[in-house]
Image (spheres, rainbow, N blue to C red):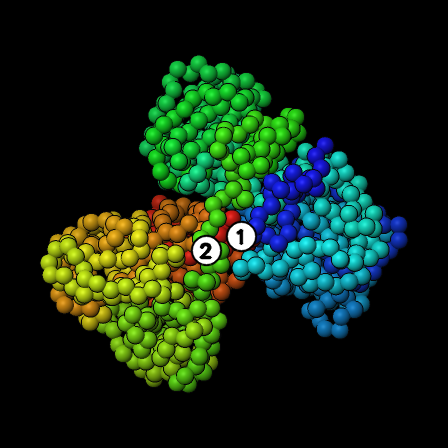
């Protein structure tokens, strides 16, 4: 048995970022009716208590109890649970007046851990304070069906208590650090704290647990239900084994198979999303929750029964919209392809080893090593090298498994380093990677790492709010309202009235605070003073009766703020007369503002000072009424989008349009002779962005017109998204997590619209996740998820995935 409190194991999961490291969690499988149970010999305080746990979900959209008490005589249950609609509920139960509270937010993130705290304080004199639910340190808005005042609940009675459930609705996923405090109503700060804007676990020594209190840390796999609080309130174990204590934890989160990816809709998940199978016959791909774009990585699969077809591999990001990444022609990926008792390898849809003579038997361990340093993929069987594929293309890759047609209920078991036993089918391998992390059946290849958060590169930006921040405020109609809370002096501020129909106002420090542009209009720059200054912690707005876009009395506003900061200047280059330019740049955040003069000659090149190729560029003629021009990843370089219009991407005129049909470089972007990008002697403003791992990303996705819509991995938890359909007319959509602080995201504004804030409505639900975002829009959702439509996006992070909480 493994003692996870051993210093060797703890050292392998510790990170300098976390004040307190958690080395393991307990995996619950709902199909095994797994649970921990205890019946107190005497009642504790039935009015006042606190429950806390770190939770990572497996299966979602099913009723699942986390903690409950059951009175078999009256068939009453009281407990904390996920509802089938993915809200969190506390059912007080057990009294003559049963009560229930549910969160408004939904929780469908399977890629990371939530911290959930439920507090009962039924003697509290204030309604609404008698039962509270916190997620990641934040008090949740709840719906209340009844009041708990002075009730004696079932929890802390002498009835049976369980972690998970005792007859149905079992929890599915991982739990770590489960606490129950008998007799004290504690806040979440007793168990966690905020560091760089991220909710993290803290050392809990010193807590007083009370008569029936307990602390389950799952550190000893031979005594899973051991209470380490000092109260010796141990739990009995059912449906769980020593192999269910795994290395996955909030301070070292491991990859699993991603149940929210739409390709997984025909499959089923179990064993903490490390086992999958299908009930239907089409090709079915299951992708991991992690994506990697650099370094060396290793994971394992286990061959199932004989005469079956299985695929394990790495699929590049551009292959995720197809089936069989790396297997069918036209995709980019590398796969070990099993046909019954033999195997071959494929690269980018073609055979890499066509002999088909490699034998594979049930129970074989297939090792997969991706080397993005030397551009290789290696496949191993039971620790022996089978084949090497050279010339691996650069890009972002996802581990994936695939089922071949007509193999119903074929299972795939995987190990990304958290469980070498494949949920108890094999003896523990006990092999770690070069960082001392992981538990593999076979020794990982030298230099290759387990796919987990501790092994992800250290992000250059941890708190996204240090470089981009959304601030909400209410206008007062004055000529000097100071807006604070930005956390820096912004260089670009974009303001929109949420409750009014005023135009979007865009202000930046390069043009000068008083000079505004409208994103929804072609109008030339106006000097109206509606933003009168950029301040150390924000900006100051004034009321201009002609423009109510910044400070109309009693109207609510949103401001999006970016930090550049370093002044740059010089002369443009390329064709035609060189012109002066100036600006501000933040290379760490991948953002620059450049103002330049046009020269009317195609091939005019403008320095952007990002130090790497831009992935998103916004340009506007300041002196003349002219369309905004936008180019980004997913837009043809021969075309442009208009920020002020809903139009599809279009050729913007003669001489190869705005961008001279030339992709930007690490140093410059090009413009043609067309007036909206290069009018002779006109002043232009350009906002330029480049991808920064863990903070900023521009990209493209394809809609499917399905509530189980596209999932887009960003490798960060986004705070802001700008989305536009590029192949047909559709509005620009702006989403942020300040206006919609929890899922489902419904509040949106259109960059090309003066409209007040709208709800996305029942056809346009949208989830922000710990590592990206997911559309949940149906067939009517042209602006977000039309079938086969192409959408570009620009995203900025709240938290990098290496440290992000589930949302």
In screen coordinates, is 37 left or right of 108? right
For image coordinates 40% across by 67% down, the residue present is 561
The residue that appears at 62% across and 39% down in the rendered structure is: 247
Residue 736 in percent (x, y) is at 45, 62
Q: How many marks?
A: 2
Residue 357 seen in the figure: yes
Camera-side mark, 1 or 2: 2
Residue furthest right as drawn? 42
Query: Residues under labels 1 and 2: Cα distance?
Result: 12 Å
Can the viewer see residue 60?
Answer: no
Relative to 276, does residue 156 appear above or below in the rendering?
A: below
Assign the N terminus to one quadrant of the image.
Answer: top right
Secondary-structure class at tag 2: loop
Give residue 804's mark.
1
Which of the 4 quarters of the picture holds residue 50?
Answer: bottom right
**Foreground pick, 630 / 89:** 630
Quarter of the figure with the C terminus: bottom right
- Near-viewer residue (533 or 705): 533
For residue 640, side relative to residue 492 (left or right)? left
Placement of 476 over or under 332, stated as above or below: below
Residue 3 vertical position relative to residue 543 in the rendered view, above or below? above
Q: Position of residue 79 (x, y in %)?
A: 73, 53
Q: Please tell me in which quadrant of the rendered image residue 145 appears.
A: bottom right
**Label 2 near label 1: C-beta < 8 Å?**
no
Q: Position of residue 379 (x, y in %)?
A: 46, 25
Please give the label number shown on residue 116. Answer: none
Crowding at label 1, few (<14), some or many (≥20) Cα neighbours within 10 Å? many
**Residue drawn 69% across the image and 69% down it:** 128
Point out which mark residue 461 bears: 2
Q: Secondary structure at mark 1?
A: loop
| Residue 385, above or below 179 | above
Viewer-proximal residue among 803 and 265: 803
């Amino acid at each position: 048995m493994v003692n996870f409190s051993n210093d060797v194991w703890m050292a392998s999961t510790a990170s300098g970022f976390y004040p307190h490291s958690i080395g393991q969690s307990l995996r619950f499988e709902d199909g095994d009716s797994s649970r921990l149970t205890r019946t107190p010999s005497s009642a504790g305080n039935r009015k006042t208590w606190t429950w806390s746990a770190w939770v990572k979900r497996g299966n979602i959209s099913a009723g699942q109890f986390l903690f409950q008490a059951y009175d078999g005589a009256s068939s009453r249950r009281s407990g904390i649970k996920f509802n089938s609609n993915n809200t969190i509920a506390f059912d007080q139960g057990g009294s003559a007046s049963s009560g229930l509270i549910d969160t408004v937010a939904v929780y469908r993130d399977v890629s990371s851990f939530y911290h959930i705290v439920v507090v009962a304080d039924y003697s509290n004199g204030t309604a609404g304070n008698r039962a509270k639910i916190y997620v990641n340190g934040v008090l949740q808005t709840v719906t209340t069906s009844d009041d708990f005042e002075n009730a004696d609940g079932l929890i802390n009675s002498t009835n049976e208590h369980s972690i998970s459930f005792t007859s149905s609705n079992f929890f599915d996923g991982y739990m770590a650090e489960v606490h129950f405090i008998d007799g004290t109503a504690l806040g979440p700060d007793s168990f966690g704290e905020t560091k760089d804007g991220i909710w993290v676990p803290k050392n809990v020594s010193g807590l007083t647990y009370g008569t029936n209190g307990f602390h389950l840390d799952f550190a000893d796999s031979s005594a899973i239900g051991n209470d380490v609080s000092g109260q010796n309130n141990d739990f009995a174990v059912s449906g769980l084994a020593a192999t269910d204590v795994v290395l996955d934890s909030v301070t070292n989160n491991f990859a699993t198979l991603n149940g929210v990816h739409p390709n997984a809709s025909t499959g089923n998940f179990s064993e903490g999303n490390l086992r999958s199978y299908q009930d239907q016959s089409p090709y079915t791909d299951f992708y991991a929750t992690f994506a990697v774009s650099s370094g060396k990585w290793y994971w394992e699969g286990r061959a199932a029964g004989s005469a079956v077809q299985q695929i394990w591999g790495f699929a590049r990001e551009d292959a995720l919209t197809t089936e069989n990444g790396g297997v069918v022609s036209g995709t980019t990926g590398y796969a070990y392809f099993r046909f019954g008792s033999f195997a071959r390898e494929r690269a980018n849809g073609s055979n890499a080893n066509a002999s088909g003579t490699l034998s594979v038997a049930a129970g074989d361990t297939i090792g997969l090593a991706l080397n993005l340093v030397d551009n290789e993929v290696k496949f191993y069987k039971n620790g022996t090298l089978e084949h090497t594929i050279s010339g691996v293309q650069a890009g972002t890759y996802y581990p994936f498994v695939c089922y071949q047609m007509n193999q119903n209920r074929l299972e795939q078991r995987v190990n990304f380093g958290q469980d070498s036993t494949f949920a108890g089918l094999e003896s523990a391998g006990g092999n770690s990677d070069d960082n001392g992390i992981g538990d593999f059946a076979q020794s990982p290849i030298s230099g290759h790492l387990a796919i987990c958060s501790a092994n992800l590169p250290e992000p250059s930006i941890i708190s996204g709010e240090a470089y981009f921040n959304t601030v909400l405020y209410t206008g007062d109609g004055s000529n000097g309202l100071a807006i604070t809370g930005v956390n820096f002096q912004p260089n670009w501020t974009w303001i929109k009235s949420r409750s009014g129909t005023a135009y979007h106002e865009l202000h930046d420090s390069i043009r000068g605070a008083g000079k505004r542009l409208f994103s929804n209009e072609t109008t030339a720059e106006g000097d109206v003073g509606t933003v009168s200054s950029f301040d150390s912690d924000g900006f100051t707005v004034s009321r201009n009766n002609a423009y109510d876009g910044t400070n109309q009395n009693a109207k609510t506003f949103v401001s999006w703020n970016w930090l550049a900061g370093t002044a740059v200047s010089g002369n443009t280059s390329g064709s035609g007369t060189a012109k002066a330019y100036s600006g501000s740049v933040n290379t760490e955040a991948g953002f620059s503002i450049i103002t330049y003069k046009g020269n009317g000659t195609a091939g005019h090149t403008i320095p952007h000072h990002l130090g790497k190729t831009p992935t998103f560029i916004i340009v506007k003629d300041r002196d003349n009424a002219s369309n905004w021009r936008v180019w980004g990843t997913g837009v043809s370089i021969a075309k442009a989008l208009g920020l002020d219009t809903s139009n599809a991407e279009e050729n913007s005129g003669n001489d190869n349009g705005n961008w001279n049909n030339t992709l930007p470089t690490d140093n410059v972007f090009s413009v043609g002779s067309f007036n909206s990008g290069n009018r002779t002697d006109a002043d232009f403003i350009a906002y330029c962005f480049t991808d920064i791992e863990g903070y900023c990303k521009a990209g493209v996705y394809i809609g499917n017109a399905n509530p189980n819509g596209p999932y887009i991995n960003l490798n960060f938890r986004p705070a802001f998204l700008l989305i536009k359909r590029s192949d047909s007319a559709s509005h620009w959509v702006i989403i942020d997590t300040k206006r919609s602080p929890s899922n489902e995201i419904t509040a949106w504004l259109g960059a090309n619209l003066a409209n007040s804030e709208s709800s996305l409505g029942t056809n346009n639900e949208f989830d922000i996740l710990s590592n990206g975002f997911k559309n949940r829009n149906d067939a009517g959702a042209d602006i977000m998820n039309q079938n086969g439509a192409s959408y570009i996006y620009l995203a900025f992070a709240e938290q990098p995935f290496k440290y992000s909480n589930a949302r």
